[in-house]
Image (cartoon, coloured by chain):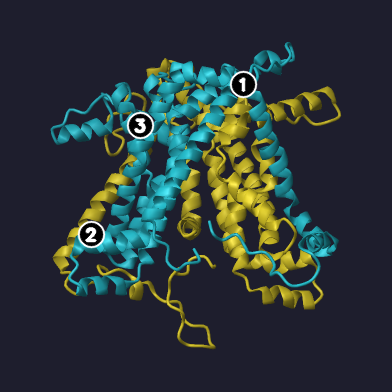
């Protein structure tokens, strides 16, 4: 089935030419554009929504304001900073003076680590999942249904079960590569465990993309076969371009997943220079939160958290449509 | 999930087994296996193999000495599983996890459903704009949510208590009072209900209008239409988010760990969720054997809960058509 179409839309009555998609207005429940809903009722709902929107946005506003407040004013809860402060960079003055985010830790490095790891991981998993999903959608082969059942079953497996042996596996690989100096150091306390598993695809994305590939009419592929295309060029020239929305959804979801992930870098990374942004911000919190025995430079924590959220907001602004579609489509698979 | 494809149609001819093996002579079969090779390899090396190893470790004393190669691994029978019963922190962390899940899942679903139904009441353009706003917390990294949780809910200077005092309520010390730690984590999760909302909104858009018209003609009031039309029609989506959120709740780690654990956390017992205690056992105390047993217990619990959910859902979830 294709992304974004109505699940239980009536079949188009006109044969032949492509029927226009049914609009939501014809389908919506009774309360959409009800004749008796007066301006007062409508106004009430709009006011209610505005109130809720303020409630939902306020934590962002609070954080953004706090990121630009000087030390000592972080928690004054003023809507805008009384005195604006630039907490991100500046001269490095030792501790009694208010600290700046980029001076206290290799924050720029962390951001860059997160950016390249998430982009590389997302690209790998998008491509690998597409290969596998296409095979499950197009080919008929022995054990196909069995393997697909296995794939669905792995969706139910909590990550905690495989977490420890996979760590030990990387630990072994690390020892092996250290024993053989010709090999690059791959293992724990390197960034490989953060993105290499992406090269094997991911059950959830395979499932999502398979639905999409199955929506492509088989005739397209048969026609390509007639033209003398091999399986590979069929996949590359027909399947991949037509599945572009599903590929974009996979890509941005995986970027988001990487940007959300704390436990993997926490398990594997020891050197500060290797940290990803989420782990780095957690370390900053530990260091500067006076409640936990830290140094009390809360403005650094706020600036860091602000910086952690910002890329996600930019990604969302750029791919809003795909985020919403990708999420909405999940629900229809239930 | 009923979408597993049906195999090739049976036709008269050689026996089933013969035809099945004949499949391996086809070039297409080998190409297909080449295509699924990445997943197959990943499944064997990163899922199935580790599962077997994890099961094995859960019956051993595997720990720091064994990782360092100083001592050999000894099987200890069911000792790790017995220890699960006797470790008071396992019990309390399980309790914490259940309490949190029971607060978070219904809260998130109810708030998401209310928001989605509100969005259905305004024009599409407005709904789109507000949907974006309500969705934003959902794209906030959990580490950032954990940080914000700590400061927004601060008992003394936090904005939440400031707001509550405006309407005359003396707010609790959310981040230090053991009985308010889990509610504050759940509230932050409910704030991030945008994903659930979008799923439910899509389901609401899919409810055919004529059902409501028919119900109205039969004299059904607003509540009856909601209870007898809306709820059954969106029940597959509700069931889906219920399962997904329950599993997410049982695995809660990042927000609570960010706010309360690690080097600078206050380590309160009330925020010690099961995954956090598992993580500590595995990667702070390096009791890998015990942590593996903990992981299998978690797996068993989530399987049992999911099976119960599916059994219960047969009574309540209405799937349109018979094929689904």
Q: Does residue A13 show up?
A: yes
Within-10-Å neighbours for mark 3: few <14, some 14–19, many 20+: some
Q: Disc 1 marks which residue?
A: B289
Tag count: 3
Q: CA distance from mark 1 to mark 3?
A: 27 Å
Residue plotted at (45% across, 37% down): B142
Vertical relation: A19 (above or below) B44: below
Residue plotted at (41% across, 32% down): B146
Q: Disc 2 marks which residue?
A: A46
- The chain assigned the colour yellow in the figure is A
The answer as to whether the residues below labels 1 and 3 share one chain is: yes
Q: Quadrant of residue A288?
A: top left
- Front-most of residues B212 and A260: B212
The subunit carrying tag 3 is B
The subunit carrying tag 1 is B
Q: Disc 3 marks which residue?
A: B99
Q: Does residue A68 show up?
A: no
């Amino acid at each position: 089935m294709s992304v974004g179409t109505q699940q239980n839309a009536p079949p188009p009555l006109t044969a032949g030419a492509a029927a226009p998609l049914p609009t939501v207005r014809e389908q919506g429940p009774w309360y959409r554009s009800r004749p008796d809903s007066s301006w007062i009722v409508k106004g009430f709902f709009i006011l209610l929504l505005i109130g809720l929107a303020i409630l939902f946005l306020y934590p962002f506003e609070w954080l953004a304001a706090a990121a630009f407040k000087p030390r000592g004013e972080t928690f004054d809860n003023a809507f805008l900073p009384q005195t604006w402060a630039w907490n991100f960079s500046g001269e490095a003055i030792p501790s009694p003076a208010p600290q700046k985010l980029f001076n206290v830790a290799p924050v720029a490095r962390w951001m860059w680590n997160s950016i390249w790891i998430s982009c590389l991981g997302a690209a790998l998993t998008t491509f690998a999942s597409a290969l596998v999903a296409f095979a499950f959608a197009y080919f008929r082969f022995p054990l196909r249904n069995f393997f697909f059942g296995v794939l669905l079953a792995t969706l139910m497996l909590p990550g905690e079960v495989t977490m420890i042996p996979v760590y030990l596996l990387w630990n072994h690989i690390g020892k092996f590569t250290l024993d053989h100096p010709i090999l690059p150091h791959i293992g724990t306390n390197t960034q490989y465990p953060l993105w290499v598993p992406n090269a094997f695809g991911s059950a959830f994305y395979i499932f999502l993309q398979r639905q999409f590939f199955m929506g492509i009419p088989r005739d397209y592929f048969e026609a390509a076969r007639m033209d003398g295309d091999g399986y590979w060029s069929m996949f590359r020239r027909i399947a991949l371009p037509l599945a572009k929305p599903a590929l974009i959804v996979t890509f941005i979801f995986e970027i988001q997943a990487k940007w959300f992930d704390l436990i993997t870098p926490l398990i594997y990374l020891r050197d500060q220079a290797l940290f990803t942004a989420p782990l780095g911000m957690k370390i900053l919190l530990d260091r500067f939160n006076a409640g936990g025995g830290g140094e009390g430079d809360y403005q650094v924590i706020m600036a860091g958290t602000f910086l952690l959220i910002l890329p996600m907001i930019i990604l969302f602004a750029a791919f809003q449509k795909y985020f919403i579609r990708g999420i909405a489509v999940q629900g229809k698979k239930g | 999930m009923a979408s597993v494809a049906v195999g090739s149609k049976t036709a008269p001819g050689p026996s089933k087994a013969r035809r099945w093996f004949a499949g391996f002579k086809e070039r297409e079969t080998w190409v297909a296996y080449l295509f699924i090779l990445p997943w197959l390899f990943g499944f064997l090396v990163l899922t199935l193999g580790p599962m077997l190893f994890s099961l094995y470790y859960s019956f051993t004393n595997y720990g720091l000495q064994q990782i360092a190669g100083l001592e050999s691994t000894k099987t200890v029978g069911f000792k790790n599983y017995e220890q699960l019963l006797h470790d008071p922190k396992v019990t309390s962390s399980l309790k914490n996890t259940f309490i949190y899940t029971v607060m978070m899942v219904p809260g998130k679903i109810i708030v998401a459903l209310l928001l989605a139904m509100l969005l259905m009441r305004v024009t599409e353009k407005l709904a789109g704009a507000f949907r974006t706003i309500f969705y934003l917390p959902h794209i906030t990294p959990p580490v950032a949510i954990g940080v914000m949780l700590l400061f927004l809910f601060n008992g003394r200077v936090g904005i939440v208590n400031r707001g509550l005092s405006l309407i005359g309520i003396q707010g609790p010390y959310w981040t230090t009072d053991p009985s308010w730690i889990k509610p504050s984590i759940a509230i932050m999760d409910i704030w991030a209900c945008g994903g659930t909302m979008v799923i439910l909104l899509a389901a609401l858009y899919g409810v055919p209008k004529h059902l409501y018209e028919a119900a109205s003609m039969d004299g059904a009031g607003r509540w009856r239409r909601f209870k007898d039309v809306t709820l059954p029609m969106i029940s597959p989506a509700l069931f889906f988010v219920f399962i997904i959120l329950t599993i997410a709740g049982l695995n809660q780690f990042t927000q609570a760990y960010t706010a309360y654990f690690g080097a600078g956390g206050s380590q309160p017992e009330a925020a010690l969720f099961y995954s956090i205690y598992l993580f500590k056992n595995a990667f702070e105390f390096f009791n890998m054997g015990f942590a593996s047993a903990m992981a299998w217990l978690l797996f068993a619990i989530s399987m049992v809960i999911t099976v119960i959910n599916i059994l219960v859902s047969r009574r309540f979830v209405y799937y349109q058509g018979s094929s689904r």
